[in-house]
């Protein structure tokens, strides 16, 4: 627990509007060191790279403690690999993470609050006959997978379509170089949540950290988004198989609040994806679609839409083994799912752990 200069100890000494339920329920744990905006003349500048689950969980926590982080995200939307592709035809495909499970109390509280506020729902698909039944609840964003992170971003300064091209020390601070050449100035604290291989490239000027990142490995995944002209009478909503080239086949309409009865998402296995990693997307889509009749076991109707997405860094195969990395002076934090494993929950836990540690550092920065 943090003690303020006036001798009071604070668990949550917030001076601003009451927090929405989703935030109170998970982001201010009992021992949190709360930061009171009005007691500090100047806000420390905090940059977070990435608006996936790790970056947003981190930002939410810091924001709830009274800090004002800025997120730089290279893509045009929130969520990172919690991704949804929308098409001109009005179709939507969750082509990255398929569902989340919650084991830790914090992530359970978060998913529970996300369901309560309508940003998520339970997914109970029909699995193919003979498939092992899952015992955990599957939770998906609603109406799209990327919706799951929206409550975390509320009120946070997220700058989309802003790619960071390099980071470097500048005196006691961090300079963030943008791909578009804009000057964002310097930051007291830098938090990077890019996938490990990308973080390694960004952090080349920090050899101690970049070196450790080299030990993490991530497998690719080709994702096929496909819509049939008519709904098909498949005996399953989800079919997964670790031994097949098409490891995952899922009917989008079986998730809560989805339309588009003919839309399916198909993931190739890590092995197939690696072997075909450098294919053109159209070629990958064609080859994956050709395997589908064997999966369904009957003649398929014509295809309305087919597109493939290459996830070069999809699933962590050798994680770091701890929740984050940080520089000796604790002004640089590096994390993401790859710290603990290939699950959304691990990204959340890494983001949260970095925020707690970063808050400790920030409270020590002289005013
Ligand atoms: C195909 C697939 C299926 C999956 N299935 C599941 C599943 O069913 N269940 C599950 O729990 N997990 C699943 N996962 C894993 C899950 O998606 C990840 O564990 C989780 O989303 C990672 O979150 P993150 O915040 O650590 O990283 P990301 O979501 O990758 O976020 C990092 C963000 O940083 C941004 N970024 C990177 N570099 C820069 C830069 N230079 N400048 C600015 N921004 C940058 C990226 O654009 C991205 O938005 C799956 C992943 C994939 C790809």
Image (cartoon, grey):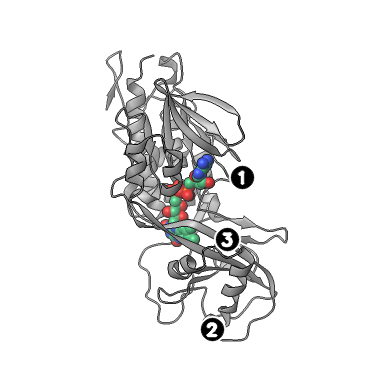
Q: Residues within 10 Å of mark 2 (few under 14, many from 20)?
A: few
Mark 1 or mark 3, which is nearer the start of the sequence? 1
Mark 2 or mark 3, which is nearer the start of the sequence? 2
Which residue is at the far bottom? 298
Task: Please report contact status of discs 1 and 2: CB closer than 8 Å, yes or no.
Answer: no
Report which residue position mark 2 lands on: 294
Disc number placed over residue 7 in the picture, else none = none
Q: Position of residue 210 (x, y in %)?
A: 37, 41
| Ligand 1 within 8 Å, label 2 CB | no
Is residue 328 visible to us here? yes
For image coordinates 39% across by 52% down, the residue present is 345
Mark 2 or mark 1, which is nearer the start of the sequence? 1
In the image, 251 versus 28, the foreground residue is: 251
Report which residue position mark 1 lands on: 76
Is residue 139 visible to us here? no
Q: Measured along the vertical axis of the image, is residue 39 above or below residue 109?
A: above
Q: Residues within 10 Å of mark 3 (few under 14, many from 20)?
A: some
For image coordinates 48% across by 38% down, the residue present is 49
Q: Position of residue 97 (x, y in %)?
A: 48, 58
Quadrant location, the N terminus: top left
Report which residue position mark 3 lands on: 309
In the image, 233 versus 348, the foreground residue is: 348
Q: CA distance from mark 3 to mark 2?
A: 22 Å
Q: CA distance from mark 3 to mark 1?
A: 16 Å
Which numbered disc, 3 or 2, marks the residue closer to the eye? Answer: 3
Compared across the picture, whether 90 is left or right of 320 comes to: right
Quadrant location, the C terminus: top left
């Amino acid at each position: 627990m943090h003690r303020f200069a006036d001798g009071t100890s604070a668990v949550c000494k917030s001076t601003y509007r009451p927090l929405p339920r989703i935030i109170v329920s998970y982001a201010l744990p009992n021992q949190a060191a709360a930061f009171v905006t009005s007691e500090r003349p100047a806000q420390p500048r905090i940059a977070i790279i990435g608006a996936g689950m790790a970056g947003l969980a981190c930002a939410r926590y810091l924001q709830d403690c009274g800090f004002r982080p800025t997120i730089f995200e290279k893509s045009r939307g929130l969520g990172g690999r919690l991704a949804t592709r929308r098409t001109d035809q009005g179709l939507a495909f969750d082509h990255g993470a398929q569902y989340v499970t919650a084991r830790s109390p914090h992530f359970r509280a978060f998913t529970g609050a996300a369901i309560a506020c309508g940003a998520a729902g339970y997914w109970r698909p029909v699995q193919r006959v003979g498939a092992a039944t899952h015992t955990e609840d599957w939770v998906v964003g609603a109406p799209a997978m990327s919706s799951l992170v929206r409550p975390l971003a509320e009120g946070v300064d997220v700058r989309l379509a802003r790619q960071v091209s390099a980071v470097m020390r500048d005196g006691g601070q961090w300079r963030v170089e943008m791909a578009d050449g804009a000057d964002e100035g310097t930051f007291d604290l830098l938090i990077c949540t890019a996938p490990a291989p990308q973080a390694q490239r960004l952090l080349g000027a920090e050899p101690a950290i970049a070196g450790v990142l080299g030990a993490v490995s991530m497998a690719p995944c080709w994702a096929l988004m496909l819509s049939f002209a008519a709904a098909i009478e498949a005996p399953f909503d989800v079919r997964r198989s670790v031994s097949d080239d098409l490891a995952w086949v899922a009917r989008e309409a079986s998730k809560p609040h989805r339309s588009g009865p003919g839309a399916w998402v198909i993931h190739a296995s890590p092995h197939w994806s690696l072997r075909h990693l450098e294919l053109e997307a159209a070629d990958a889509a064609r080859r994956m679609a050709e395997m589908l009749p064997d999966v369904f076991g009957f003649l398929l109707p014509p295809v309305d839409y087919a597109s493939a997405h290459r996830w070069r860094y999809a699933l962590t195969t050798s994680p770091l083994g701890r929740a984050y990395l940080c520089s000796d002076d604790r002004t640089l934090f590096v994390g993401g799912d790859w710290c603990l494993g290939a699950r959304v929950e691990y990204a959340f836990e890494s983001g949260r752990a970095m925020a707690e540690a970063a808050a400790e550092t920030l409270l020590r920065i002289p005013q």
